[in-house]
Image (spheres, rainbow, N blue to C red):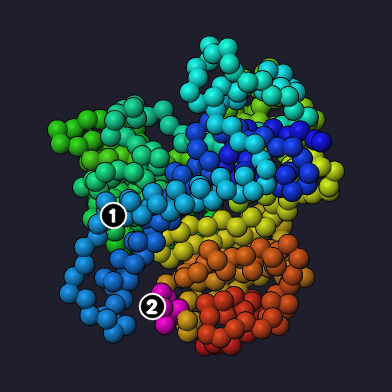
């Protein structure tokens, strides 16, 4: 029986373990901190628990009266919300543990280091590195899935105890009076929404010209407008020079073309990205090559050592949980002799703010840069019946298409249910669908999903529910 060792129990590792067991391998999974990895414990899941509550608060404050609900007042309880977050995380982690047992995966909690390219040594949780009881495990194949950790930029003062990362931001005992968020990407915008909703004065500092710069800016605009309307300050094209301790709070020293500016904040959140977590693996003992701090892999996640694979954030690719899971499956299926690969064109990118943002495929700018003659179709959420019913009419659906063939190159959405509906665009790109095929696909009424069909019609200037 094939022996596969998996290092890391996050969405890349545990999914790979289950798939390997399904295909008949003898699987050992080693995790040094917690099952579910960053995603379940200090990432996707807990963040979305907090964001869901802020959505309810927004509805109570802004929509309830119009919808026929009179509320005399409500209390937002941060402590109770934290308890709910912990409960949901615990339940999901328990579910992963149950799935591993159900699939007869051997789980070891401890730190793994490579001995050579066919052995790892595991230091159990309650042992130290000098223990003679460290277990050596032989393997035919290994899959590295150790994930990533927050980047700490070399900003003077970033080691101050009130300068935090997303890990700490999820579990603050109380809501600070003010917070400066360095980095206006997905993580920064999501935390800005959460803390602003709970009465914290939030400022976002971003070096790039726009926030959420990796997405099509036509769908980012509605989010930026909403954040500004809610009182969140956003400074783009701005560099943080240092973080200093002031008399009552931290002083974030910034510079831009407009000059220097000092932002006072009780907490400073660093959200400038993540980097592979490889520090304890001793990759050199197995002869595994790295590049710019990440493990080098081919399209099937294979390293330079033919029997060792690396999936998820540790290989420096697209750092998303669903990508890690897909890569884990590809690695296992390749090991077990199946032809398997990922179509990286179909990776959805999501932001769980209000409005939600979701994107798959090429942005308009990317398509033009690649030489396509582009046609786009836009349909505003403001005229979608279900969006009106929900009171969430901020947003737009945008298709990017090849003018010559009508093939869909990208779908970009801002609005309600965007993160759920984006799968339609992913499937369309995967199947090389055309605008005509989307137009002729019947969409249920009334749904937000109708806006995808309407945006497809809009590519040719033929949207049914838009004035000419």
- Classify mark 1: residues with Cα within 10 Å, few (<14), some (14-19) or many (20+): few
- Which residue occupies 34% across, 36% down? 164
Extreme-left residue of the structure: 247
Residue 185 visible, this orientation: no
Q: Which label belongs to residue 176? A: none
Looking at the picture, how far across and down is residue 331, in whole percent? Answer: 74, 42
In depth, the one of 43 and 231 nearer the eye is: 43
- Which residue occupies 74% across, 28% down? 139
Q: Is residue 443 above or below residue 413?
A: below
Q: Which residues are magenta?
A: 387-393
- Which residue occupies 52% across, 57% down? 350
In depth, the one of 370 and 249 nearer the eye is: 249
Dividing the picture into quadrants, the one containing residue 313 is: top right
Q: Is residue 466 above or below residue 179?
A: below
- Which mark sits nearer the N-terminus, 1 or 2? 1
Looking at the picture, how far across and down is residue 7, in whole percent? Answer: 63, 33
Q: Secondary structure at mark 2?
A: loop
Looking at the picture, how far across and down is residue 327, in whole percent? Answer: 68, 45
Residue 466 is a magenta residue: no
Quadrant containing the C terminus in the rendered view: bottom right
Looking at the picture, how far across and down is residue 309, in whole percent? Answer: 72, 34
Residue 392 is a magenta residue: yes
Q: What residue does disc 2 label?
A: 391
Q: What residue does disc 1 label?
A: 80
């Amino acid at each position: 029986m094939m022996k596969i060792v998996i290092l890391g129990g996050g969405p890349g590792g545990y999914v790979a373990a289950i798939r390997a067991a399904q295909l008949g391998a003898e699987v050992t999974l080693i995790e040094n901190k917690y099952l579910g990895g960053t995603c379940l414990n200090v990432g996707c899941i807990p963040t979305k628990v907090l964001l869901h509550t802020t959505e309810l608060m927004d509805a109570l404050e802004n929509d309830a009266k119009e919808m026929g609900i009179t509320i005399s007042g409500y209390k937002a309880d941060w402590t109770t919300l934290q308890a709910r977050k912990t409960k949901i995380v615990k339940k999901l982690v328990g579910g992963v543990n149950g799935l591993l047992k159900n699939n007869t995966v051997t789980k070891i909690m401890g730190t793994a280091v490579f001995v050579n390219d066919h052995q790892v040594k595991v230091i159990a949780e309650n042992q130290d590195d000098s223990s003679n009881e460290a277990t050596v495990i032989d393997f035919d194949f290994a899959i590295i899935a150790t994930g990533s950790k927050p980047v700490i930029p070399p900003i003077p003062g970033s080691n101050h105890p009130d300068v935090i990362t997303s890990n700490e931001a999820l579990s603050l005992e109380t809501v600070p009076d003010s917070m400066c968020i360095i980095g206006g990407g997905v993580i920064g915008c999501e935390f800005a929404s959460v803390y602003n909703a709970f009465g914290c004065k939030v400022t976002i500092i971003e070096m790039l010209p726009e926030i959420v710069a990796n997405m099509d800016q036509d769908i980012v605009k509605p989010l930026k407008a909403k954040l500004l309307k809610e009182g969140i300050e956003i400074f783009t094209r701005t560099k943080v020079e240092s973080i200093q301790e002031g008399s009552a709070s931290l002083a974030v020293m910034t510079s831009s073309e407009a000059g220097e500016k000092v932002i006072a904040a009780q907490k400073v959140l660093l959200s400038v990205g993540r980097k592979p977590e490889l520090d304890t693996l001793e990759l050199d003992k197995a002869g595994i090559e790295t590049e710019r701090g990440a493990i080098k892999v081919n399209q099937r996640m294979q390293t330079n050592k033919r029997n060792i694979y690396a999936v998820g954030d540790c290989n420096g690719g697209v750092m998303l949980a669903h990508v890690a899971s897909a890569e884990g499956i590809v690695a296992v299926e390749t090991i077990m002799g199946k032809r398997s690969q990922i179509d990286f064109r179909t990776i959805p990118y999501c932001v769980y703010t209000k409005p939600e943002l979701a994107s798959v495929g090429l942005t308009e700018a990317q398509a033009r840069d690649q030489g396509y003659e582009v046609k786009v179709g836009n349909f505003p959420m403001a005229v979608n019946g279900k969006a009106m019913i929900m009171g969430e009419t901020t947003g737009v659906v945008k298709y990017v298409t090849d003018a010559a063939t009508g093939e869909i190159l990208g779908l970009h959405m801002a609005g309600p249910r965007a993160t759920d509906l984006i799968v339609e665009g992913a499937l369309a790109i995967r199947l090389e669908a055309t605008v005509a095929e989307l137009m002729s696909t019947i969409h249920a009424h009334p749904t937000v999903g109708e806006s995808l069909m309407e945006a497809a019609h809009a590519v040719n200037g033929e949207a049914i529910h838009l004035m000419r």
